[in-house]
Image (cartoon, rainbow, N blue to C red):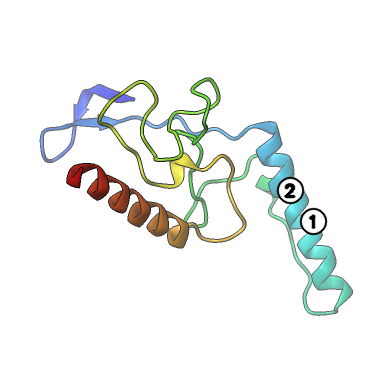
Amino acid sequence: MLDASARDRFGQFRIAVDWRMSERDVATITGLAEEIGKALAAQNIARLQISSDILAGRPRPGFHCHQMGTTRMSANPKDGVVDADLKVHGLKNLHIAGASVFSTGGGVNPTLTITCLALRLGEHLATKVAA
């Protein structure tokens, strides 16, 4: 949300981010860390020490985090913000391309998928403009 009490160096309102993880997010992160730890130990490759923040259900955001799902893609406006063409439901000329349209986060860096979505959207918009 916009923070009307603070402005950035360009005079624009600063954005206040309220970033929280659901219980499911925490359980997924914890479960994944435990499974990776078991696999590494079983092969005698390494011993994984899970951070106390994760074990306490408070994983910290960092460079490894990719915020996704804020403007989910769905054919049904009740279940998402954009359609398969990345157009915002109910609006004529607003499209969104980025990780926010993912319904869930993946296990790898999302950059390639985001790039493919952007290229696909570009082709779609070029077709509409040419028509």
Residue for badge 1: 34
Q: Are marks 1 and 2 in contact (CB under 8 Å)?
A: yes
Q: Position of residue 93 (x, y in %)?
A: 25, 31
Looking at the image, is 14 positioned above or below residue 32? Answer: above
Question: Is 73 on the left or on the right of 6, as rendered?
Answer: right
| Residue 5 in view in this figure | yes
Q: Position of residue 119 (x, y in %)?
A: 34, 57
| Mark 1–mark 2 distance (CA, rounded to whole Å) | 6 Å
Counting labels gives 2
Residue for badge 2: 30
Amino acid, disc 1: Glu
- Between 25 and 85, the one nearer to me in the picture: 85
Density class for disc 1 (Cα within 10 Å; few <14, some 14-19, many ≥20) is: some
Q: Quadrant of the C terminus?
A: top left
Question: Is 112 on the left or on the right of 59, as rendered?
Answer: left
Secondary structure category for the residue under label 2: helix
Question: In the image, what residue occupies the spot 45% across and 62% down?
Answer: 112
Q: Position of residue 59 (x, y in %)?
A: 62, 45
Q: Position of residue 82 (x, y in %)?
A: 43, 32
Q: Quadrant of the N terminus?
A: top left
Looking at the image, is 62 positioned above or below residue 43? Answer: above
- Between 83 and 31, the one nearer to me in the picture: 83
Amino acid, disc 2: Thr
Q: Toward which corner of the image does residue 100 lie, by quadrant?
A: top left
